[in-house]
């Protein structure tokens, strides 16, 4: 961490700032689910610009459509209205250069760590020597060198998530989408995994969109945090953290970190209370 | 003491007890042979080759019915899985299938296929195939959604997703179906040979029984038990390895 960051200023914006170079954009994105006897307006309309190389997090109450937003940007789901663009091209299906890490364990239990990490490269027909080079690097980077021959069942939850991150890393994505990747991990592991993620972000210069329910995670990791409303989810606020790029989990002990989480909670509390009061009535 | 050793001791004790009861005459030779004598008789029929044709017939029929059950059960499972309305209609029938004594259909099979291997295989397949259908449905139901999403992220075609993600993910469940298919094929074939055949181990056991040839009868029974134990041990070993990888 750079201690100078401790003096950084929290900037709260009603509107998101105009990005220097939009890497991914959502315009008027709306998602409505057809239920057997009704419809569910899950998301939107949403407008979002992700700057190239930005670490952007989304926080919001449960069921506000955070994961739906990620699915649309990943091309896993199509919106009923609005458009998603990545590198200037409309998102129709999963775009080239996008990597996703899910909350659930997505490692393939029948493959060892090395084969799990190499899976996407083999499907993409990458040269075997290049596969070996990239896999060796990713396994080393994620601290999995001693477990390359192990199967996921022999690893802890945190280690399996490292495998999934390594599998994404080897594809050299330019946009990394993370859907609550540390949700199932304990607090200590989450902080350390956060450090790994920041290291990966710095190393790859990729744009990162992190979906999380943990305010501390969003405050520690992000350049900018978008706060979503209750369903149908829309952005009600954008908070710029002001951290320097060279940061790690030690920022949690700074007063500035407390300021950011307080700001986020201030907005989110209102939305969470709406859900609670709706549940009581 | 491990579970494995305890199980071995229980089985060994029972065999020794039967051996003792046979040797002191509590169990007459006309009723049962001592286990050691069964082993001698088994070695003898294997050496002389007296029942080789029957043994060959039975194991060929078991192999064919197992293979047919696995293939038909897997394909039927895929079809039923892909047609939710059909599945909804069939599920109560599949759930209560094993309440039906399949062997009551043997006259139909004799009419259709005559006395011989075809009828025997048909009964064994009828008995075994549903276990494979159920295992296939179970396996497909349990593929984690996130694995299919991962395949989408890698922009894999439907066929590649099925081959490289869905099939390996269902393999531990499919193998349970394979195990049951083997077991039901053994039961179906050997039991059918008692009533539907002029050849095979089941027929030879019934024939020896009718002629009071206890030596041959117990030798063949022992052969079936030993074979089933070996086959099950191998299948269980493979199953344990597959199940161990399934733990998430």
Image (spheres, coloured by chain):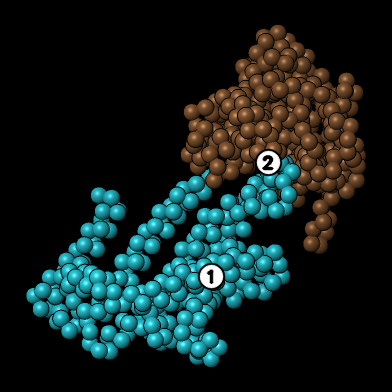
Chain colours: A brown, B cyan
Taking the spot 47% from the left edge, 81% from the top edge, the residue there is: B117
Image location of residue A139, percent across then percent down? 57, 28
Q: Quadrant of the N terminus of chain A?
A: top right
Q: CA gap, disc 1 to disc 2?
A: 33 Å
Can see residue A103? yes
Using residue A144 as the reference point, say whether residue A243 is left or right of it. right
Q: Position of residue B98 (x, y in %)?
A: 50, 76
Q: Which residue occupies the foreground of this view, A129 or A135?
A: A129
- Foreground pick, B96 / B58: B58
Residue A213 shows up from this direction:
no
Quadrant of the image occupied by residue A159: top right
Vertical position of residue A49 compared to residue B170: above or below: above
Which chain does the numbered disc 2 sit on? A
Secondary structure of residue under mark 2: helix
Which residue was labeled with disc 2? A123
Residue identifier under label 1: B69
Residues beneath discs 1 and 2 located on the same chain: no
Structural crowding at the residue carrying mark 2, measured as other residues with C-alpha within 10 Å and reported as few (<14), some (14–19) or many (≥20):
some
């Amino acid at each position: 961490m750079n201690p100078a960051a401790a003096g950084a200023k929290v900037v709260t914006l009603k509107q998101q700032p105009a990005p220097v170079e939009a890497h991914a954009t959502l315009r008027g994105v709306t998602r409505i689910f057809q239920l057997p006897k009704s419809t569910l307006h899950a998301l939107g309309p949403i407008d979002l610009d992700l700057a190239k190389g930005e670490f952007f997090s989304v926080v919001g109450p449960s069921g506000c459509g955070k994961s739906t937003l990620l699915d649309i940007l990943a091309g896993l789901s199509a919106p009923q209205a609005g458009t998603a663009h990545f590198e200037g091209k409309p998102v129709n299906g999963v775009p080239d250069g996008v990597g996703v890490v899910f909350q659930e364990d997505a490692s393939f239990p029948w493959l060892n760590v090395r084969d799990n990490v190499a899976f996407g490269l083999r499907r993409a027909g990458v040269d075997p020597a290049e596969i070996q080079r990239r896999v060796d690097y990713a396994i080393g980077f994620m601290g999995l060198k001693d477990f390359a021959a192990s199967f996921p069942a022999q690893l802890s939850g945190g280690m399996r998530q490292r495998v999934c991150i390594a599998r994404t890393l080897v594809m050299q994505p330019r946009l990394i989408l993370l859907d609550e990747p540390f949700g199932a991990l304990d607090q200590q592991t989450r902080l350390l995994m956060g450090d790994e993620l920041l290291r990966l972000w710095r190393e790859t210069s990729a744009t990162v969109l992190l979906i999380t329910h943990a305010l501390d995670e969003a405050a520690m990791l992000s350049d900018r945090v978008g706060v979503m409303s209750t369903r149908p989810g829309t952005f009600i606020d954008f908070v710029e953290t002001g951290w320097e790029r060279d940061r790690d989990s030690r920022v949690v002990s700074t007063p500035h970190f407390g300021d950011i989480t307080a700001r986020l909670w201030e907005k989110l509390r209102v939305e969470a209370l709406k859900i609670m009061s709706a549940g009581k009535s | 003491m491990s579970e494995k050793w305890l199980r071995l001791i229980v089985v060994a004790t029972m065999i020794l007890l039967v051996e003792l009861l046979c040797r002191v005459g509590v169990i007459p030779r006309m009723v049962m042979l001592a286990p050691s004598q069964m082993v001698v008789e088994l070695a003898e029929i294997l050496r002389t080759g007296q029942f080789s044709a029957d043994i060959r017939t039975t194991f060929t029929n078991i192999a064919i019915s197992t293979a047919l059950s696995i293939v038909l059960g897997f394909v039927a499972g895929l079809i039923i899985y892909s047609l939710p309305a059909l599945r909804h209609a069939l599920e109560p029938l599949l759930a209560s299938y094993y309440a039906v004594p399949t062997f009551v259909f043997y006259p139909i099979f004799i009419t259709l296929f005559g006395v011989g291997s075809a009828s025997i295989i048909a009964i064994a397949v009828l008995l075994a195939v549903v276990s494979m259908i159920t295992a296939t449905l179970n396996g497909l139901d349990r593929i984690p959604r996130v694995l299919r999403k991962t395949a989408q992220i890698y922009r894999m075609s439907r066929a590649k997703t099925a081959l490289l993600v869905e099939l390996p993910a269902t393999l531990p469940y499919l193998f349970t179906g394979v195990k049951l298919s083997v077991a039901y094929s053994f039961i179906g074939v050997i039991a059918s040979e008692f009533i539907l055949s002029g050849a095979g181990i089941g027929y030879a056991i019934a024939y020896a029984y009718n002629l009071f040839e206890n030596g041959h009868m117990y030798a063949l029974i022992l052969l079936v038990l030993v074979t089933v134990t070996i086959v099950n041990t191998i299948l269980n070993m493979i199953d344990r390895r597959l199940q161990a990888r399934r733990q998430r």
